[in-house]
Each structure stands twice: as structure tokens, then as C-alpha cells.
Image (tube, grey):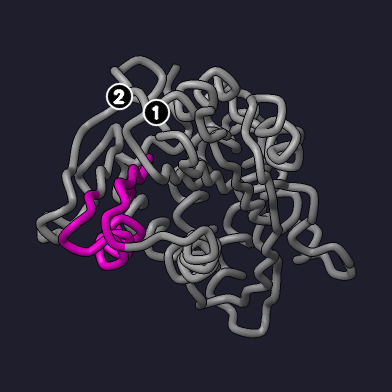
């Protein structure tokens, strides 16, 4: 399987920057609430540009460690703190160390994997007893322009729906999987499961617009070729992303967490 957003394209850098600006603080708040501290062993799965791994390193200090993995390491900063190990890794096929981590975090990774439930089980096996798994995924439940009062708003929503359709065709799931994450984590055996959602309303020219621009610059032509949208629709979408007065919603970010049971 080839990923729709394979992070090999130049647009990936803009996507990582926008996602970090919009959601890093939310990620940090959730992980802080779980008690991350000096000495923790962490795994940042799908490290992207490395912003979360760098923050983790500051929390675990010299006594701890952070493994930052991805299938493409081109965008991750090479001047990471010394306790960060950067490694090429495919979580669906490569070895996973058992009971090795106090915290595993992945944002916008598992939704792209058809075998996501099996991967959750692999990640749980990699947690030390009492360790935490934190998964964050986009859910398409809230439309970008729910009012749809103007032609431009309706066009924007149509293009975003076309992008979601392309994701689905590549095996991703931005509907049933993210919104059911807490139940899936419970069924997988985790305890102390919790979840929250964050909905970001963005305007043209902001980091949120940068995420959308990167996605559609990378995939827009595919949507046109597939007959999901017209070329004029794509041009309108990209133009609106530069207009400060145009407002839209990013997909709902579902953050879910759970803890591996302590051994008795």
C-alpha cells in the first residue's frame, strides 16, 4: 500500500509546521496530565518534523530517553537533544520491543493504516506495565463550512470531502475509527481510558490554512483526475486559503489515551 500523504513530497514540511502550530500545545497538555517526568522512556511514532520528540526530551531530561521513528526521516531535525534516538521504522512490519516504554504517542498515523487495530495491540505490547498509549486522529464529523451559505463555502467543503474520499480509497479512515478510539482502546485491554476533542477554526493565511494547502497541493490533481472535483474547484479552494476573511474548521482532532495494566 502507498500512503496518500507519503511525506516524501515537499509539501510535507508545510503540513508538519501547520499541525505543530495548531495541535502541539494540545498534545503537550494531554501528555503532561499523564505525569511525564524525568526518567521516562518515550516513543514518538510518526515523528514528522520532531517537535513532539524534542518537547518529550525536555520533560524526561538526561535520565530518560525518546525514540523518534518514521518511515521517512527527511523532515526531522538532526540537532535533537542527545537523549533522542532517530530511527527509520515501519510499525506494521518492523520489530517492536516488548514492555520497553512508559509512553507511546502517535498523531495522525494509525488512521492511514488498514491494520490499525493490530497496530494498537503491537503498541500495547511495547508499553511497560502502567505505561500510557496516546493516539490522536482527525475525524471528519464536523464539516469545514457547516453553514454552506455561499458558493465558495460549498466549494471548499466539496474539495475537503474529495480529499477524504481519496484517503478512504487508500485504506485510511477519518470517520468510524477516530470517533471510536476510546472504545477500541478499552477493548484492546487498556485501563484508565479517556479522550477529548479539539476543533480548530482557522482563517486564510494561518497555520491551519497551511495544513490544508499542503494536503491539496499534494493530492488535488489526483482528486481532479478521479472526477471528484473540477479544476476550478481546486483553484477556488487554494485561493480561499490565502484570504484572511475566509473562515473554516479543520477536522476534529480526537485525542485518546489509556494505560497498560500493572502486573499483579
Q: Residue at coordinates 19% horizontally, 57% vertically from top-left?
A: 63
Indicate the position of residue 203 as horizontal and vertical percent values.
Answer: 62, 77
Q: Is residue 187 magenta?
A: no
Image-based side of 78 in relation to 27, left or right: left
Image-based side of 244 in relation to 54, left or right: right
Q: Which of 204 and 249 lies nearest the eye of the viewer?
A: 249
Instruction: Indicate whether 7 appears above or below 123.
Output: below
Instruction: Indicate whether 4 appears above or below 150.
Output: above
Mark 1 closeness class: few <14, some 14–19, many ≥20 residues within 10 Å: many
User: How far is disc 2 from disc 1 in space, using C-alphas?
Assistant: 6 Å
Indicate the position of residue 182 as horizontal and vertical percent values.
Answer: 71, 40
Q: Is residue 210 visible?
A: no
Query: Residue reaching furthest front?
Result: 264
Q: Residue at coordinates 44% horizontally, 38% vertically from top-left?
A: 5
Q: Circles 2 and 1: CB distance less than 8 Å?
A: yes
Identify the mark at residue 97; answer none if there is no mark: 2
Amino acid at each position: 500500500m502507498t500512503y496518500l500523504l507519503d511525506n516524501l513530497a515537499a509539501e510535507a514540511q508545510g503540513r508538519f509546521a501547520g499541525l505543530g502550530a495548531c495541535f502541539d500545545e494540545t498534545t503537550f497538555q494531554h501528555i503532561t496530565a499523564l505525569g511525564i517526568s524525568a526518567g521516562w522512556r518515550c516513543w514518538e511514532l510518526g515523528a514528522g518534523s520532531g517537535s513532539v520528540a524534542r518537547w518529550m526530551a525536555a520533560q524526561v531530561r538526561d535520565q530518560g530517553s525518546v525514540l523518534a521513528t518514521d518511515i521517512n526521516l527527511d523532515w526531522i531535525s538532526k540537532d535533537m537533544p542527545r537523549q533522542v534516538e532517530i530511527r527509520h521504522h515501519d510499525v506494521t512490519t518492523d520489530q517492536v520491543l516488548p514492555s520497553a516504554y512508559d509512553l507511546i504517542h502517535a498523531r495522525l498515523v494509525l488512521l492511514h493504516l488498514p491494520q490499525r487495530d493490530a497496530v494498537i495491540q503491537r503498541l500495547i505490547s511495547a508499553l511497560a506495565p502502567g505505561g500510557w498509549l496516546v493516539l490522536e486522529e482527525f475525524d471528519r464529523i464536523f464539516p469545514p463550512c457547516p453553514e454552506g451559505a455561499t458558493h465558495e463555502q460549498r466549494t471548499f467543503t466539496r474539495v475537503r470531502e474529495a480529499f477524504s474520499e481519496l484517503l478512504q480509497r487508500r485504506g485510511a479512515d477519518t470517520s468510524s475509527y477516530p470517533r471510536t478510539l476510546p472504545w477500541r482502546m478499552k477493548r484492546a485491554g487498556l485501563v484508565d481510558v479517556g479522550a477529548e476533542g479539539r476543533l480548530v477554526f482557522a482563517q486564510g493565511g494561518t497555520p491551519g490554512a497551511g495544513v490544508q494547502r499542503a494536503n491539496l497541493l499534494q493530492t488535488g490533481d489526483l482528486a481532479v483526475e478521479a472526477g471528484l472535483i473540477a479544476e476550478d474547484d481546486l483553484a477556488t479552494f487554494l485561493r480561499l486559503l490565502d484570504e484572511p476573511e475566509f473562515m473554516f474548521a479543520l477536522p476534529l482532532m480526537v485525542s485518546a489515551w489509556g494505560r497498560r495494566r500493572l502486573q499483579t
